[in-house]
Image (cartoon, grey):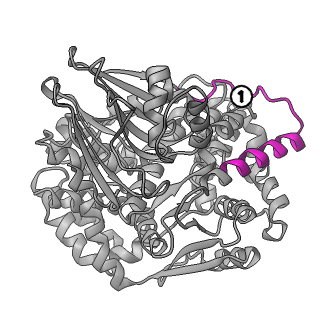
Amino acid sequence: MAQRLIHRGPDDGGVHVDPSSGVAIGARRLSIIDIEGGHQPLSNEDGTVWAALNGEIYNYPRLRRQLLGRGHQLTTQCDTEVLVHLYEDFGADLVHALEGMFAFVIWDSRREELVLARDRFGEKPLFYDTTAGELSFASELSALQAAGERGDIDALAVTGLLTLGYVPGPRTMYERVRQLPAGHVLRWPLAEQRATITRYWEMPPSASANTASLEVLVDETEDLLDRSVRSRLVADVPVGVLLSGGLDSTLVAALARRHTTDLKTFTVAYDSGVVNEDAPARVTSELLGSDHHELRLGASWIAEHVPALLSTLDQPIADPAFVALTAISQLAREQVTVVVGGEGADELFFGYPRYRWLARAQRLGRVVPPAPAHLAANLARRAAGGARAGRLADVLQPASPLLRNLGWITDGLLADRAGFYGPRMQDGGDRDDLRALVSELWGHGTGSALNASRLDQRLYLCDDILQKADRASMSMSLEMRTPFLERTLAEFSATVAPEIHMAGGGKNLLRRVLRRVLPAAGTGRKKTAFRVPVADWLRGPLAASVDEHVLHGRLVRDGWIEPAAGTHLVGRLATEDGAARELWPLFCVGTWLDAQA
């Protein structure tokens, strides 16, 4: 199992086997802190408590000082060591003391109990299987596969991939395996041979409690984010920043520049399409005086590397930005071991345009009766086209906020995809089950924009954005850190009313902080991510792979989709760029399935 995870930890590895119980813990280590002394798994003084950690505990220096003050003996400067001693004092409640990104296991040989935990937002993955009264766990599905057969592929997971672009947790690609949800602890007493899973953290329920002035809110945002960025720069190895052309990474880079004299930044660009971000990223790097590195992806690189990247994932991610993020991670790893990114800003500070459209729809629904609203929506659809006109028609059309948001986040695929389903999907990939999962997570908040933000935090951020970041970076033995997800900053953001966040085009507080930190960068930057020219790739360097994995692979042979559906999509792609949004998930799933044969 550990050998399957060498890419996550190429510097060191270890195994501890408890002689009386047979419990075994394996670890691979990417050395970041205390390079020489941080061997894992490690134990307390008498060897009764053992721990292995994937990730970083950012507040470990303070925790270490507190533990020493209480009489504990710590022999390393490694953050993993604080876990065993915190456990001695607080048991499984130690998670409340931790600030970081983590998935860890603790073995208590006195109580004969395993404790597993995952960080608050799910930055680090943790999979487990409890088949036949035994517990197996790992950071990736590939390691669990090395421990034995995992069962059949989950049809609802495939439905999630083909509509959402990712597997919605706690499900995985295999029916027997689950993901430990973010912000949860799993306890496994050997005597009971049964898992108990409890939530230890969630975002505060209210979002309008903060009555401070806008200037004070900006002050607090700047202070908390600056502290978080500073903590993410602590390492005994070189650190850099992934820099796109957007607000989030620009702000992170500007704050990082305060605390380092040697700032390295990295950007990816393309030789096709119109979505390049190299120019604005280059301007930012010049303003900051960073040591800037650019990568331009060409057709030959795409043809050579993309099928291999998709086939070696432990489970598919149908987010095309995964490709760009993996490529830039490879470039960054040549210079640094840790990078800092801007993930989480949109979900916490209301950056997505659909939040504002949902708020508009909610206001219209209060004043416009359903019949006139329906008529206006039909008129808007027949008027001059364009994305904005289509969104306006959606806003005018009477609908529940949940279904409206679900239609937008799936780009209509939840309804359209049923026509593609083969017998395997019709037997187990029920769209209503997916709707039920989203409905459960939607909650009963005070406004649709707030509900959508919370849904994204628990689903899209956790199962797409953060898993994409983890797999892309760790495949290159690179650690990615996310300052926007620091607990105090996240909880502060939840006290601010959505209307304040959404003012000025969204991420109002962050825009105002950037105006202070780097005035020359401007505050009118539109939301920008690692976008990719998918249609150009599928028509060009990936055309042969599409033919192999979509039209003639297991996707069709095993009955996941109807053969005619794939053929129709490939035909449409010749003249319609929009067909790529439907074809890319099929290509990702098909490539992965063929690698499992």
Counting from the top left corner in percent of width and height, residue 114 is at 30, 26
222 horizontally vs 447: left or right = right
Q: Secondary structure at mark 1?
A: helix
The residue that appears at 42% across and 52% down in the rendered structure is 37
Which of 292/20 is in front?
20
Which of 109/315 is in front?
109
Q: Is residue 104 visible?
A: yes
The residue that appears at 47% across and 30% down in the rendered structure is 85
Kindly indicate the quadrant of the structure image that contains residue 515: bottom right
Q: Is residue 506 visible?
A: no
Residue 219 painted magenta:
yes
Kindly indicate the quadrant of the structure image that contains residue 256: bottom right
Q: How many marks?
A: 1
Kindly indicate the quadrant of the structure image that contains residue 310: bottom left
Which of 526/380 is in front?
526
The residue that appears at 33% across and 49% down in the rendered structure is 161
Question: Furthest-top residue in view?
Answer: 192
569 horizontally vs 410: left or right = left
The quarter of the rendered structure image containing the C terminus is: bottom left
Counting from the top left corner in percent of width and height, residue 499 is at 76, 38
Q: Disc 1 residue type? A: Arg
- Residue linked to disc 1: 366
Counting from the top left corner in percent of width and height, residue 103 is at 40, 40
Q: Which residues are magenta?
A: 201-228
540 horizontally vs 533: left or right = left
Which of 319/467 is in front?
467
200 horizontally vs 555: left or right = right
How dense is the environment of label 1, judged by Cα within 10 Å: few (below 14), some, or many (20 and up)?
A: few
The residue that appears at 72% across and 34% down in the rendered structure is 363
Residue 200 painted magenta:
no
On screen, 320 above or below 207? below
